[in-house]
Amino acid sequence: MQQNHVLQKPISISAPNNQTVKHNLSRTNLFMLSVGQIVGAGILSMLGIAVGMTGRSIFISFILAAFLILATLIPIVLTSGTVRLPGGDYSRAALLAGKKWAGMYIFIFAISNFSISMYALSFADYLLALIPGLPHQAVALGILTLVFIFHYFGIKNAARWQTLIIILLSVALTMFTVLGLPHVQPGYFQQPGFMTHGGIGILAAAAYMTFTVGGAQFMINFSGEAKNPTKDIPFVMVISTITVAILYALMAVVASGVLPLHQVINQPLTHVANAILSRPLYIFFVIGGALIALTGTMNASIGSSLSPIVQASRDGWFPKQMGYLHPKYNSPVVILGIFYLIGILPIIFGWNISLISNSVLILTNVVSLVLAISTIRLPQVMPEQWAKSAFHVSNRHLIELSLFSAATMIVQLVMFFRSISTTAVIGNVFVVVLAYLFGVWRTKYVTMDLENIK
């Protein structure tokens, strides 16, 4: 790896026309975005599968899953708690791993955004389950368009909508939990039904449920827009992960304790909700737990994708015009337009984009693994900032923390490799070759002023 320049000067994100991204996201805004990024409709379908792995001890798996996610967040907390990163993880890759790795990262990151349309299509699936006969394609296009309109009027506007989304989502999930807990049958901790596959089952379910508890790591991509990123982003990542994990653990008690296990295993969470909620409340739960959750995840995902692309355009990886900001709303309208086109094409033409999404899943985690190990270079690349950081530790402890986080990522990668197809493996290899060629091709056109980050 090439050693980067020592970082000494402050920076604001600048577009090609000398526009500046505003630092206007508060801790509350970031928390709402983080919760929206974590909570998705997947919890409705995945919880029943996890119950089949460990029975009523599933709540323990959620706590373990939270610890696994928190361990993977350590390198991000250390870096984002030390400097403002205008390009989020892209800037982190440039600082810690070097210029070419940053190019490979932003290529993989850009491709991963093809999954935007999947949220809209899933939204349409759930809505049609409640209201049969609606035009599926029109519903998907409608919700996707609505969310992009949020972001056209600026990230602060999108964050306000996210607050309303999270309030509705929290009410729905809390309602399921509070109304369901009194229905939990006696003998919850007794056999049969508790730890049905021993400790291995609890661990397997924990690894599986990291898919539902993870997501807060993307908050680093809001570093450029945050009012106080070095304090707020680490705080929000940790607190939002713990908060959602506790809520999910309580929901798991209801999901596994109300009905006999054989009626719950491999069944969606709506099966239990239908047994404990009245019809109006059941409908509200499905809307809040699925439709609102998908809207929140889509909103947060689009928001967290913008800053890295803006910064990469500014540096020269992409055309500089892509980084243009709306003069009034400060939104990257060109990038939003490109992402919107990427989102609507699969919906209009019925493309199967699940292969693309699965093909970058492993690569995204491999990139995170490399950056976790590279975190040991913090004292080299930013000695003054690291010395003043609230998260400063000795070099020995820094190495230990980085390697511990990397080890937890390796465990998760092993679980990923066990679950993907040969086609997905080939897809990963193909994408990494393209990413490498992109990095080599564009490097000579790129100027990265790393000294400007503080």
Image (spheres, rainbow, N blue to C red):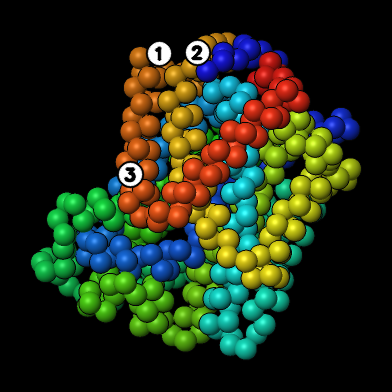
Say what amino acid the circle numbered 1 marks: Asn
Q: Are marks 1 and 2 in contact (CB under 8 Å)?
A: yes
Query: Residue 99: x, y in percent?
Result: 62, 23
State the residue position of label 3: 414
Mark 1 or mark 3, earlier in chain: 1
Alpha carbon distance from label 3 to label 2: 30 Å
Q: Is residue 179 visible?
A: no
**Would you identify the image quadrant in which residue 269 lies?**
bottom left
Q: Is residue 319 visible?
A: yes
**Which is more toward the observer, 423 or 117?**
423
**Would you identify the image quadrant in which residue 330 lies?**
top right
**Which is more toward the observer, 25 or 221?**
221
Say what amino acid the circle numbered 3 marks: Val
State the residue position of label 1: 395
Question: Which label is found at residue 379?
Answer: 2
Q: Is residue 4 left or right of residue 335?
A: left
Mark 1 or mark 2, earlier in chain: 2
Mark 3 or mark 2, earlier in chain: 2
**Helix or strand or loop: what does disc 1 sit on?**
helix
**Which is more toward the observer, 204 or 11?**
204
Say what amino acid the circle numbered 2 marks: Pro
